[in-house]
Image (cartoon, rainbow, N blue to C red):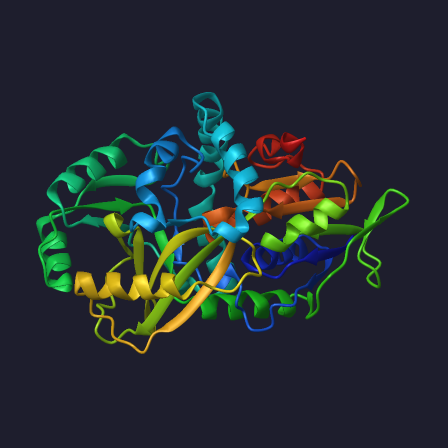
Amino acid sequence: MAVIGIVGGGVVGLCAGIALVDAGHSVTIIDDDRLGQAASWGNAGHIATEQVEPLASPATIRALPGRLFSRGGPLAFPPDAIGRWLPFGLRLMAAARPARFHAGCAAMAPLMAQALPAWRDLVARLGVPDLLREEGHLVAWHDAHAAAAGRAAWQAAQTGTARVARATYEDIARLSALCGQPVAGAVRFAGTAQIADLDALRQALRHAFVARGGRLHAERAQVAIVRGRADIPGLGADTVLVCAGVRAAPILRRLGHAVPMIAERGYHIRADARAWPADLPPVVFEQRAMIVTRYRDSVQAASFVELGDPDAPADPRKWDRLERHVADLGLPMAGPFQRWMGCRPTLPDYLPAMGRSARAANLFYAFGHQHLGLTLAPATAHLITALIDETAPAVSLAPFDLSRFG
């Protein structure tokens, strides 16, 4: 039995903690997010198995000018953060070259195939199967030309184990009634899922971890390498696992790793759910780059990719625009809205970082899942546990090693 210290108690860290305790280790998670404000607990709740293709792609580069926030789109480059997003953007463009994009797809496909089975197994073992809703999701367009182009793009995309088909007449009629205006077209995905309640998920994971003998320390962790071995001062860990999301980058940079991560800041608004159908799966309004999710007691609209500093103040214009999107679409969401902003940990090739450090043999990492942290958390937990236990992971982790950045 190893004494393992995990830095970061978001969804990846908690899932890894549970998997490692179940494997017979003594595990302590160190995390200072007491109120659960990290991106793990403010996302769209979508188990996005369809997102096999990395966002570092030729299509992303071609679409970039029309998606700028200044032109009404969802993508923002804050001028005062140019020192962060410009180097990141240059790396992204290199990663979007066709050969690297196809290599990224090949790396992600087997990883994404593990996502939904791992979620099913986890919620069953935790005794909370109702937290996982396997009803797919919808993508809708209000413009006929956009609907035709969007439907063709999704049907041509690599979607892994997820399947896409034209939405039924009933689906389109229901969405049109919801919006109070005609929906020109929609597709329905099968093989995707959602989390019914992110707050309940956080509590279930924390409870399960502690009930199994794990320990939670509410503080910010420091990691040091002494005589070739990693440790968390005061813990005396045999093994250190860094799962700290956007906070992982400075930790690993101090230890000598190249980690060209950026904070990809996303925004959401939440409202009372009484006017939103309880049985409607997540809906993506693709022309607005917005996903609306019905949770147990709230409905949430989320959007925006803002590349910048994780500690910069939130930009109220993003929330204002989200509220305008909701009003323009006629959605049954009424204020006052709860506003949130969180930081996705994103690397320029849009692949996660998972592996063993070349700086210390007892230092491991699992972070950088960008939009897919919730989707991949249980699968990541299994893979990193296998790596720590020196057994063969079910998926090769070579494409996700930090050595790819030099």
Considering every residue shown, the one lying at the far top of the view is 99
Of 248 and 110, the residue lying toward us: 248
Quarter of the image that includes the C terminus = top right
Of 117 and 343, the residue lying toward us: 343
Considering every residue shown, the one lying at the far front of the view is 79
Horizontal side of 311 relative to 240 (left or right) equals left
Q: Position of residue 192 (x, y in %)?
A: 34, 48
Q: Position of residue 221 (x, y in %)?
A: 73, 61
- Quadrant of the image occupied by residue 178: bottom left
Q: Residue at x 53, y 40 (%)?
A: 86
Considering every residue shown, the one lying at the far bottom of the view is 336
Q: Residue at x 87, y 42 (%)?
A: 228
Of 185 and 303, the residue lying toward us: 303
- Quadrant of the image occupied by residue 405: top right
Tally of numbered discs? 0
Q: Position of residue 381 (x, y in %)?
A: 59, 49
Horizontal side of 6 relative to 178 (left or right) equals right
Horizontal side of 138 relative to 337 (left or right) equals left
Q: Position of residue 317 (x, y in %)?
A: 37, 63
> Residue 281: in sight, yes or no?
yes
Horizontal side of 234 relative to 289 (left or right) equals right
- Quadrant of the image occupied by residue 67: top left
> Residue 378: in sight, yes or no?
no
